[in-house]
Image: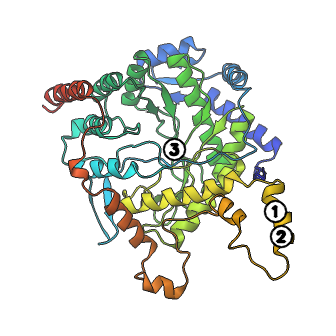
Amino acid sequence: MGRIRCEVTILKPEEIELIHNRTLRILENVGLRVPNEECLDLCEKAGAIVDRQSSVVRIPSKVMESLLDMIRKKYADEDNVEIPSKLAGSISTQVFVIDYKTKTRRYGLLDDVMKGIALVEHLRNIPFCDAVTIPSDVHHAITDVVSYQKIYEYSTKPGGTYILSPESARYIIEMAKVMGRKVGYLLETVSPLQFRKESLEMALIFVKEGQPLAIAPMVMGGATGPVTLAGTVTLMNAEVLGSMFMVYALSREIPGFYGHGTHSMDLRTMICSFGSPNQALLGIASAQLAKFYGIKAGSNSGLTDALVPDFQAGFEKALSAIMSCMGGTIGIGAQGIAGADQGFSFEQLVIDNEWIDAYNYVIDGFEVNDDTIAADLIERVGIGGNFLGEEHTLQYMRKSYWFSKLFNRNNWDGWVKEGSKSLLDKAHEFVEEVTAGYKERLPVIEASKYEEIEYIVERAKKELCK
């Protein structure tokens, strides 16, 4: 099998060591703000030095190194990332929905969540059906509860949304138990070097219910981190390792993924940039640091600052995704987003599903053997012949060429004859075709589970919507 191998690096070994050592210094001398007494107790038991007055947890270097040794030992047998992994897209719940046909933006509705569920059923590279938007027509205290409700009831794929409060978290966990599923909580730092009180409270709820925690620090170079890439990466590393320590202290589980959402800020607009070339560099650095710690990494690559799916969007997504993944990361940022979290687009998600399919085709490589080399066939067809009518062509044509449902492969005349449709036109047609009738979509779970979930949501409404 001819396969691509990862060879892309940005950091020298001595530079990785320097970043690591400075990271340990920051965690030991500065630490993390942890405004929760129970969490402070658990951090202290895990070896941290706790300042109760300031709620700051300082992690001695020897304690952090001990945890890293446990991480390396636990994940020592995992496959390396010299051969890039196939990609899958995810969805980040957005506040707004973009209508590319009218070039307008509006607040999301519960109807959009339902349409998203119907659409994701037809996108093979989007394995999780997360809510595409926060439904503004639902009471703010239970938007996450209702989104989980609809996903559990109407999606054949697992999924969820950002969990917004300790109160709603309890109902979401209860629904997950009805479904027989785990429901994780994303314990994010607020850069630089602190956690929200509410986030820690929710993390404790999930740990006590036997549910997993994930991490995703989101340092923004030039704003919540140093403007230099080396400084951004060092603070990112400090928050990733600090978050790993927090997960271990709270749950005694050994974390095994280098997850983050680090970006740079555009210093002209003061807006977080999703598509700058820095994303490629941050992704490569993430892969190298994760490999140093013996684990795998993701990065917020495969994103764009473009507000419409134009050349800029395609170029920025491809540049950061390919460079990061060739560096060794195994995950990209959420798809279907217009610009830097400016809203969700159904059409963009369809386009993203398509480019991921093309990427995965390349990652698969191609078979090299006597039959695929086809030397006998080449000799038999000879000079000036063609291979269109050969049995070999029929046998291998679908394995040897990627057939796109959206991207143009036609000539000018053929394109005009078919209506001169743009990629956006085709994506919109696909959305409307596969989601037709979504308002009448029937539940996909058995009646008993449906009734239990409905009961849980009714209780949540009575308690939380006062």
Q: Position of residue 372 (x, y in %)?
A: 78, 58
The kind of secondary structure element at disc 2 is: helix
Q: Identify the residue at horizontal 18%, vertical 48% (top origin).
A: 137
In primary-sequence order, the first of circles 1 and 3 is: 3
Residue 436 lies, in percent from the top left, at 27, 58
Image quadrant in which the C terminus is located = top left
Q: Are marks 2 and 1 in contact (CB under 8 Å)?
A: yes
Q: Is residue 408 above or below residue 397?
A: below
Instruction: Quadrant for residue 264, please give it.
Output: bottom right
143 is higher (above) or lower (below) than 436 = above
Rendering colour mode = rainbow
Kind of element beneath mark 3: loop
| Label 2 sits on residue | 378
Residue on which disc 3 sits = 218
Which residue position holds label 1? Answer: 374
| In-image side of 364 versus 409 (left or right) | right
